Amino acid sequence: MKPISLHTSLVVACLLATKTLFAQAPAELPQIYKTREIQAPAQLKATLAEQRKLIASRRLTFQVANTGVSTLSLNVLAGEKNELSDAERARIKTLVTSTRLDPRYGTLLQSLQKVCFADKAKYDARVANLVSPVRNQRCGNCWAYSAVGAYESSYIKVNATASTGIDASEQYAVSCSGGGNCSGGFAYKVMEWLVNQNKRLATEANFPDTGTNGTCPIATPATDYRAVSWGVVDPSGDINKIASVAQIKAAICKYGPVAASVLVTPLFQNYAGGTFNEMPSNTANPSTNHAILLVGWDDARQAWLMKNSWGTNWGENGYMWIGYNSNNIGRRAAWIVAKKRTLVLANPTVVAQK
């Protein structure tokens, strides 16, 4: 028998390690994903195997699995429109840079900024109970979930409401705001509709998501789900830019979780945990197709904590850690300020609305 060379031994060891890595990846996942792995269709299992090889070869830092949305079309999941005309960008820039937040709300927000500091290494708005539960969109209306999610967090913050104390209707935003439909839209248009047209949202109980465009009812919702201001996180007012890490952190601390967009891919669709870092962001010419909510950060991970609208059977119970410079995250970052139910005024003749 010929002795096995050191080179051959190393090759065999590497091959065995690689085989073990790919074969055992699902076993390292939470139990729900282990079960789903067994139940996955053959084609999906093959896709996941190829994705795991890619992740290993590129030394990426996240896992994939059979998530609650793995068998759905990205057209259903990613409904943010990418293209925006130069004229529309200019209009939004003029609108947001010429509008100022009511100083009384500025004072209120400052008084509520107790545990979030942009210079800190870590923040999670969930710990501060400022994030409503993860929702599950039923068509390409992620843009409505992004905007409503930001609104709900602001409402919780401004009104000192429990995180489960508000469930506003994304369907009402789809049917009434003019921001888009089940085939796509823009989160900022919901914010503009709420503030600049002085509209309000219905409750989810009265106007649930039907997975269709729906028809806007004639009657105004009997809620106090109104807003007083909104804006673009990037100081230039350019809604299409990727806001900087410092700008987004400051906005989260001042206003609460912010709506933003990201470029979704099949790897993103199957994300099951870890820090997502598929591709570097293209700050010069970013493109995105999905709207989400940024609720925190971790400098140790160099990542944002992102709330999605694909249910809790995706990612880490509906959330993702995504690298600061990954997949154009942070494009179209925007904030909104909910109307306070009662606001003590220095001058009672002044209405607490812009």
Image (cartoon, rainbow, N blue to C red):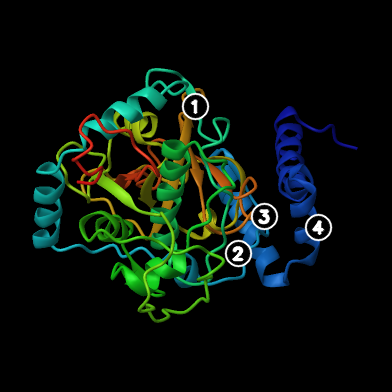
- Identify which amino acid the numbered label 1 is placed on: Tyr
Q: CA distance from mark 3 to mark 4?
A: 10 Å
Mark 4 or 1, nearer chain start? 4
Q: Secondary structure at mark 3?
A: loop
Return the x and y of residue 75 as percentages of the image width and height: 45, 71
Residue at left offset 42%, top offset 55%: 148
Q: Which marked residue is nearer to the observer: mark 2 or mark 1?
A: 1
Q: Residues within 10 Å of mark 1 (few under 14, many from 20)?
A: many
Q: Are marks 2 and 4 in contact (CB under 8 Å)?
A: no
Q: Mark 3 highlights which residue?
A: 65
The CA span between labels 3 and 2 is 10 Å
Q: Amino acid at mark 4?
A: Thr
Q: Residues within 10 Å of mark 3 (few under 14, many from 20)?
A: many
| Secondary structure found at label 2 | loop
Q: Which residue is mark 4?
A: 35
Q: Is residue 283 visible?
A: yes
Residue closest to the eye, 300 or 109: 109
Query: What's the CA distance linking mark 2 and mark 1?
Result: 28 Å
Q: Amino acid at mark 3?
A: Ala
Residue 58 at what x, y percent from top left? 52, 42
The quadrant in which residue 251 appears is top left
Question: Could you tell me how far apart the alpha carbons at marks 4 and 1 are, in whole angstroms?
Answer: 32 Å
Residue 265 tag number: none
Real-space CA distance between mark 2 and mark 4, rounded to the nearest whole angstrom = 15 Å
In the picture of the structure, the residue carrying the numbered disc 1 is 123
For mark 1, give the secondary structure: strand
Q: Do tag 4 and tag 1 residues touch (Cβ < 8 Å)? A: no
Which residue in the protein does label 2 denote? 69
